[in-house]
Amino acid sequence: MNAVAISVPVMVRAEDVEEARLAEVDREFTEYFGPNWRRWKPWQVEQYVAAIEKVHAEFAPQGVAA
């Protein structure tokens, strides 16, 4: 008997994708600046907050369909 591969689409929630991206931003910044956020310089915090805001903006509603 031959096995046949079947492709089944996987449903992915936008919230899960956003959370994964936010975790990626956290990981990147803690690798660059260290895990102790209290030691980060103000410009490092500003970059981090901007990166988080950018991710949130990517997943914000873009308008209402008519």
Image (tube, rainbow, N blue to C red):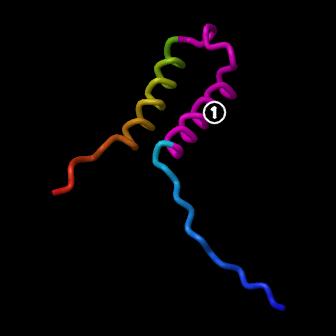
Q: Quadrant of the C terminus?
A: bottom left
Q: Where in the figure is residue 42, as x and y percent of width and height?
A: 50, 12
Query: Seen in the image, is 20 located left or right of residue 57?
Result: right
Q: Where in the figure is residue 51, as x and y percent of width and height?
A: 47, 31
* Quarter holding residue 60: top left
Count the marks: how many?
1
Q: Which residues are magenta?
A: 16-41
Of all residues shown, which one is farthest toward the left? 66
Q: Residue at x 57, y 62 (%)?
A: 10
Between 65 and 27, the one nearer to me in the picture: 65
Q: Is residue 29 above or below residue 9?
A: above
Between 12 and 29, the one nearer to me in the picture: 12
At numbered mark 1, what does the secondary structure look like: helix, strand or loop?
A: helix
Q: Is residue 15 above or below residue 30?
A: below
* Quarter holding residue 56: top left
**Magenta segment main secondary structure:** helix
The residue tagged 1 is 28
Of all residues shown, which one is farthest toward the front? 1
Q: Quadrant of the N terminus?
A: bottom right
Residue type (three-letter) at the residue carrying disc 1 = Glu
Categorize mark 1 by other alpha carbons within 10 Å: few (<14), some (14-19), many (20+).
few
Q: Specify whether residue 42 is painted magenta.
A: no
Q: Where in the figure is residue 50, as x and y percent of width and height?
A: 44, 27
Q: Specify whether residue 27 is painted magenta.
A: yes
Q: Residue at x 53, y 38 (%)?
A: 19
Q: Residue at x 55, y 40 (%)?
A: 21
Q: Residue at x 56, y 11 (%)?
A: 41
Of all residues shown, which one is farthest toward the right? 1
